[in-house]
Image: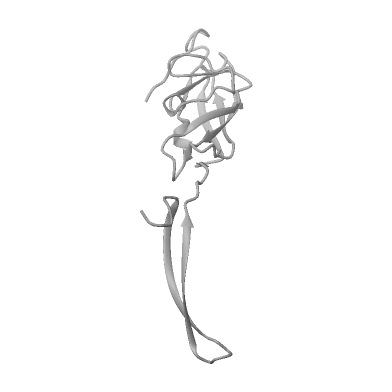
Amino acid sequence: MSSYGNDSYARFGYSASYYDDATELPESAIHIILVESVNDPPALTHASTAIHMRENLVAEIDLTSLVVDVDSEQLIFQLVTLPGVGSLYTADGDMIADTRVPLTPEIASKLVYVPPANLAGTPLASFGFQAIDEEGMTSPEGTVAFFVSGDYAAMFGGHGLVRVSE
């Protein structure tokens, strides 16, 4: 530990020689510069993410893959808006109906969007989210949009939904 404290990220020094106009003799000085660490906010990999899906199927979303943070080990995710059409669920099947509930990385990495049966649109719905690091720095708002196409109603008899996994 240096005498500069634990908060120093880095330090370096340099010496410089210059001439004093009055004496015309070289003078020397040593300068020490302390560099403090700075918390960078989380960053989005893309401001908007499009998910293309077929009608009457569900989509799985991993919000953790849409954000990077070079100096945080644990991010919390916050929904800013909910889909206007359809519903968003956790992998455990709990519907997300409130934007004020923080999502852990474990939950945010396994979200499920369920569009209404027999409905298509480009985009059909979207939701907004932000990531928050340990020090409260937030990412810009990201958007996930769902582009639902096709006519799968006949294939499933117009009843229920099918979950597709990789």
Is residue 122 visible to us here?
no
Question: Depth check: 80 or 73 in front?
Answer: 73
Q: Position of residue 119 (x, y in %)?
A: 59, 17
Question: Depth check: 143 or 50 in front?
Answer: 143
**In the orientation shown, which residue stands out farthest toward the bottom?**
24
Look at the picture and state if 58 lies above or below 11: above
**Left or right, residue 143 beside residue 4:** right
Task: Please name the residue shown 47% across and 58% down the image.
Answer: 35
Task: Please name the residue shown 57% across and 15% down the image.
Answer: 116
Is residue 54 visible to us here?
yes
**In the orientation shown, which residue stands out farthest toward the right?**
84
Q: Position of residue 85 (x, y in %)?
A: 62, 19
Q: Position of residue 124 (x, y in %)?
A: 61, 25
Look at the picture and state if 31 lies above or below 72: below
Count of numbered circles in the view: 0
Question: Depth check: 57 or 20 in front?
Answer: 20
Task: Please name the residue shown 50% across and 50% down the image.
Answer: 38
Coloring scheme of the render?
Answer: one colour
Task: Please name the residue shown 59% across and 19% down the image.
Answer: 98
Q: Position of residue 166 (x, y in %)?
A: 37, 25
Look at the picture and state if 134 lies above or below 114: below
Question: Depth check: 5 or 69 in front?
Answer: 5
Look at the picture and state if 164 lies above or below 134: above
